[in-house]
Image (tube, rainbow, N blue to C red):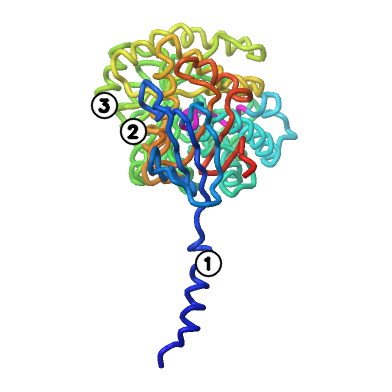
């Protein structure tokens, strides 16, 4: 028995009205000049259409449907959202005194980190790579809309040897292996203290189980840790290879904290894909990184800050001295470069995140700086492959890319200083096709 025409019409009407067939929201950015993430020059005035969470069309093809929101660009610059490739959302939101306080709970730490994540998004940073620390609750809250914040590529707890850069124990806390009790930092999800191949495998797999997009290992001494001098190498080749093997089985990669030639070369031999810091490397090691296709995630660190402990200032001297040379040499030699801030334990520093980008003018043109913190950093995020928590292209303004966008009051290629004052100069911030700032009334 054939259904009646009335039943067919009703079924079609219901299908059209269903959420699956509902038209995606559209926004038209009209009369904008585009920095596409790569070009050294802005485009001629054009239009960019966003549909849902993607860039749907650019130029004459950008024809919105009735009811679309309109952003009048008036010749201002539309560019990709900024990306910070080295953050610690929790560690940067709290001082060392707060982190060590017996009153600190996971909920309090998450609340503080959520506040800073919102501020970071309002500075135009729409994506970050969190390379160590408590992150799972905050990331889930951002992705579910409970918190405002950037997209997060999480590493989870850092993985450190006993006495390594991620050993955050107080003098009163003894080894878990010998005395059976996890340290407070381990219980808070800040670190895994893992010795030997088996422990490193377990720590790596535990982070992957929780959703790590990449693994962070401590391969050398650090300036913000109590026990290890900066010059020491950490983890044997076999231990590091265990992490690389486990991450590779999950089709992602390991990046390591390391400053010196010895630490970096051992990590490269183990098969890591990224080096964080590296300010004490020689040109020969940089050439090895280039030849092995290893990323260098580098920072522009200050000699000291108002709240920095004297011990930390002293430990940083060699790092600070090597910093200008390594930036220049890495660029000259063609090493794959990424930029990040790596702010730790001084919440007041977070407000200088945008201004930190201006320090890159020592080695890069303004257009190169913008490319580094959009297109190039996005390429590093893409190294997570199928473990990336967000599928889609970032760091560019092109058809099909994810709609993470900033409308800048002016031309940041002509005046890079515009990005240092996002409150005044970022008229619109959009993440995933949704307005974070500057939504038009219509």
Query: Horizontal and vertical percent for residue 255?
Result: 40, 31
Rendered residue at 61%/35% (across/down): 438
- Quick one: label 3 or label 2, which is nearer the N terminus? 2
Dividing the picture into quadrants, the one containing residue 184 is top right
Q: Is residue 16 left or right of residue 114?
A: left
Q: Locate the N terminus and report the quarter of the image it occupies.
A: bottom left
Residue marked by disc 1: 18
- Quick one: label 2 or label 1, which is nearer the N terminus? 1
Residue marked by disc 3: 292
Looking at the rendered structure, the secondary structure element under dot 1 is: loop
Q: Which segment did they paint magenta? A: 80-92
Query: Horizontal and vertical percent for residue 436?
Result: 60, 38
Q: Is residue 61 left or right of residue 307?
A: left
Q: Could you tell me if residue 335 is visible in this image?
A: yes
Rendered residue at 31%/32% (across/down): 271
Query: Is label 3 in contact with label 2 (beta carbons under 8 Å)?
Result: no
Q: Badge 2: few (under 14), some or many (20 or more) residues near its Cα, within 10 Å?
A: few
In the rendered picture of this protein, how many numbered marks are placed on residues?
Answer: 3
Residue marked by disc 2: 238
* Closest to the observer, 275 or 177: 275
* Closest to the observer, 154 or 378: 378
Dividing the picture into quadrants, the one containing residue 245 is top left
- Quick one: label 1 or label 3, which is nearer the N terminus? 1
- Would residue 189 be counted in the magenta stretch? no
Query: Is label 1 in contact with label 3 (beta carbons under 8 Å)?
Result: no
Q: Badge 1: few (under 14), some or many (20 or more) residues near its Cα, within 10 Å?
A: few
> Where is 344 relative to 208, above or below?
above
């Amino acid at each position: 028995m054939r259904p009646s025409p009335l039943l067919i019409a009703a079924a079609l009407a219901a299908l059209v009205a269903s959420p699956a067939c509902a038209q995606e929201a559209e926004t038209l950015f009209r009369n904008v000049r585009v920095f596409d993430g790569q070009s050294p020059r802005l485009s001629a005035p054009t239009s960019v259409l966003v549909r849902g969470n993607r860039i749907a069309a650019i130029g004459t093809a950008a024809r919105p449907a009735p009811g679309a929101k309109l952003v009048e660009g008036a010749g201002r610059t539309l560019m990709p959202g900024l990306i910070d490739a080295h953050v610690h959302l929790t560690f940067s939101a709290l001082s060392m005194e707060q982190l060590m306080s017996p009153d600190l709970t996971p909920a309090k730490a998450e609340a503080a980190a959520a506040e800073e994540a919102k501020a970071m998004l309002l500075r135009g940073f729409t994506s970050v790579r969190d390379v160590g620390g408590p992150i799972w609750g905050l990331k889930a809250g951002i992705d579910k809309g409970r918190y405002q914040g950037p997209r997060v590529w999480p590493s989870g707890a850092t993985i450190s040897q006993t006495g390594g850069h991620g050993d955050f124990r107080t003098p009163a806390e003894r080894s878990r292996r010998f005395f059976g009790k996890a340290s407070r930092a381990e219980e808070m999800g800040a670190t895994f203290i893992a010795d030997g191949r088996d422990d490193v495998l377990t720590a790596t797999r535990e982070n992957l189980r929780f959703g790590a997009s990449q693994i962070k290992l401590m391969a050398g001494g650090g300036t913000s840790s109590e026990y290890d001098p900066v010059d020491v190498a950490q983890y044997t080749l076999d231990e590091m290879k265990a992490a690389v093997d486990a991450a590779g089985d999950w089709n992602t990669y390991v990046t390591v904290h390391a400053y010196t030639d010895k630490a970096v070369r051992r990590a490269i031999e183990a098969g890591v894909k990224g080096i964080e810091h590296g300010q004490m490397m020689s040109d020969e090691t940089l050439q090895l990184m280039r030849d092995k296709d290893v990323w260098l995630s580098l920072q522009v660190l200050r000699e000291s800050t108002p709240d920095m402990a004297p011990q930390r200032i002293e430990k940083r001297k060699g790092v600070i001295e090597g910093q200008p040379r390594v930036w220049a040499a890495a660029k000259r030699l063609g090493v794959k470069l990424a930029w990040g801030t790596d702010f730790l334990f001084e919440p007041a520093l977070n407000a200088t995140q945008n201004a930190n980008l201006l320090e890159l003018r020592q080695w890069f043109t303004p257009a190169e700086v913008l490319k580094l913190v959009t297109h190039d950093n996005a390429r590093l995020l893409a190294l997570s492959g199928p473990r990336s928590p967000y599928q889609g292209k970032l760091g560019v303004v092109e058809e099909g890319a994810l709609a993470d966008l900033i409308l800048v009051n002016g031309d940041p290629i002509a005046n890079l200083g515009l990005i240092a004052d996002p409150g005044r100069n970022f008229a619109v911030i959009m993440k995933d096709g949704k307005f974070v700032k500057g939504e038009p009334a219509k």
